[in-house]
Amino acid sequence: MDLYSIARWLSSEYHDLNGTHIDVLEESPTALEFSRLVHISRPVLIRGVQIPSVRLWDDEYLASALGEGEISVAVTPNGRADAVTRGPDGTLYFVEPHIEKMKMAGFLSKLSDETDDSEIYYLQSQNGNVYSNQFFQGTPDPSEFEAIRADIPSEIPWCTATFGKPPDAVNLWIGNHRSVTSIHSDPYENIYTVVRGSKQFTLLPPTEGCCVRERMYPHGTWTRQIPNAALTIAPSPDVPPIRWASVIDPDIPGNLPPDAHPIRITVNEGETLYLPPGWWHYVRQADNTIALNWWYDMEMWGLSWVLLNLLRGVGEVPSGNDASEEVEEN
Amino acid sequence: MDLYSIARWLSSEYHDLNGTHIDVLEESPTALEFSRLVHISRPVLIRGVQIPSVRLWDDEYLASALGEGEISVAVTPNGRADAVTRGPDGTLYFVEPHIEKMKMAGFLSKLSDETDDSEIYYLQSQNGNVYSNQFFQGTPDPSEFEAIRADIPSEIPWCTATFGKPPDAVNLWIGNHRSVTSIHSDPYENIYTVVRGSKQFTLLPPTEGCCVRERMYPHGTWTRQIPNAALTIAPSPDVPPIRWASVIDPDIPGNLPPDAHPIRITVNEGETLYLPPGWWHYVRQADNTIALNWWYDMEMWGLSWVLLNLLRGVGEVPSGNDASEEVEEN
């Protein structure tokens, strides 16, 4: 029995026992209830996580609160930051976005300008842009969102109690329907709250990692060769190749193999998704969607970490640019 | 990569990250602390689980409390109930013990009679002999140990709170140094308290299941063909073959492969071992050892159950009686 057959066996057994059902909680769980969900490691949709301060956020408030301060925004011509994209040389690259500094007011007007279809803006800096681990370690933690930090809780009390530690990072995400997050998995416990708008998640359990067909890609960055020029992919010769899913859009029929069991879930305003470590997720959003997420470090002791590494595949990962590999591009 | 290579990879990764250390808690954990231990799924030695009533147990009390009531005791000529043993026909069988009904007083005097080395007695009925799941379902649950039930808590409060359900079974174990429990794993969360004497556990993590080399064995039972005759192995033609470890004594150097990492731990009077599901255990005990255990059903949702099944090996298990299989017998 080879690794691929084992992965298929695991995937099928897991699906037979767990199905594709997602529990919905009307109230926040207690720490003890949440610890059972974490142990099962299934996504759960939680209603009733109350963060009253952020319910007052509108564009005017955000623009005014952040004023002249500059924020880092991802810019791409295709809406796919951190995704596999074919370069002008015909090679597939894992491409990071161009980062542009701008004021919140300018960013929000870019987002809502329906006539401007040249470039796509997405606030997704995801480096602990609201609170990084420096904050939780008690060291200075400057943030571009300092002015609205008071609105954003640094931790979710029942999560911190379950994990016995504060988050590792808290992030703010603002985007529209033109931005997509390519399918990937994180080694984090993720609490994802939609403040405004809605997010559509396409999920695959860790057992179905083989369905996204990870491959190795050279690294590139969307770059302006001269100011105001169009963005082009600049290869990054000094960055090692990146392992990434070769499935670009898992929502297009046929892009996932027939034995994949994707779970599609919409997280609406005021709702929170618990996304356990290792779950693959592809994310789209409605226009004017604002979300917050809290990442807690996953448990490295015990079997889970070792298992997740097994499920991502032991041994060498092939190049995504082999002639034998066909990648759909949409 | 075949299943055996994958098992070895998992075993080595798990060992590199987790080592062979066993945490010792001086006090009982809270439910939330225990839930983190359950999530990690590592054995833990817990001191300070207080069960004052059973600390008063001595032979005289037990004999007197249980009086004329009969209890079911396992009898074997070799001290190995539920173990692989070679029959007179040269075949290896998985052999269950002969069950003899006797009074507690008679059993205890058998246990402490150093001159009687003909047969070995072990109270190990392990069918929920103190409280079975009928008790927890609120249906009548007659027990041979009814008379001392009041001394034995039906549940461990912080375990019940962690798992969100009562135990599935509570058992009393009484034996001496001549009885051994062959290496096996259970699909249960196990809380094991030593009331008197001591137990020596040899443990292997679930990732090292391949080290015990499970094989299929025909079933047999230690039986007296006529009253007072010596015990012989009677094959059970109607019972399907049993899958069991072919390693008889993992404590003898060389019986486990060099890449096994056994953990040896002694649980003394007043101490409690948390043994997570899927951990392989081989158990010996000092003379006059009394123990209690609480089995809670393990979580079947999520990845753990699927993983444990993978680690026990997917596919056909070979017969333990193939000429090519060499089994040490000690």
Image (tube, coloured by chain):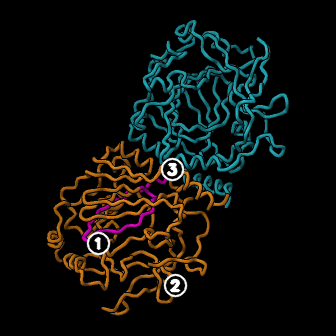
Chain colours: A orange, B cyan
Mark 2: few, some, or many residues within 10 Å (few <14, many ≥20)?
Answer: few
Question: Which residue type carries mark 3?
Answer: Leu
Identify the residue at image location x=79%, y=17%.
B225
Stretch in magenta: A276-303
Q: Position of residue A236 (x, y in %)?
A: 47, 83
Instruction: Name the quadrant of the C terminus of chain A.
Output: bottom left
Q: Are marks 1 and 2 in contact (CB under 8 Å)?
A: no
Q: Chain of mark 3?
A: B
SS assignment at label 1: strand
Which callout, 1 or 2, points at the residue further toward the start of the chain? 2
Disc number at residue A226?
A: none
Asked if badge 1 and badge 3 are on a common chain, one would say no
Position of residue B28 in the picture relative to residue A294 (left or right): right
Provide the residue designation for mark 3: B303
Question: Is B303 situated above or below A193?
Answer: above
Question: Which residue type carries mark 1?
Answer: Gly
Mark 3: few, some, or many residues within 10 Å (few <14, many ≥20)?
Answer: many
Whether residue B110 is visible to the viewer of this picture, yes or no, is: yes
Asked if badge 3 and badge 2 are on a common chain, one would say no
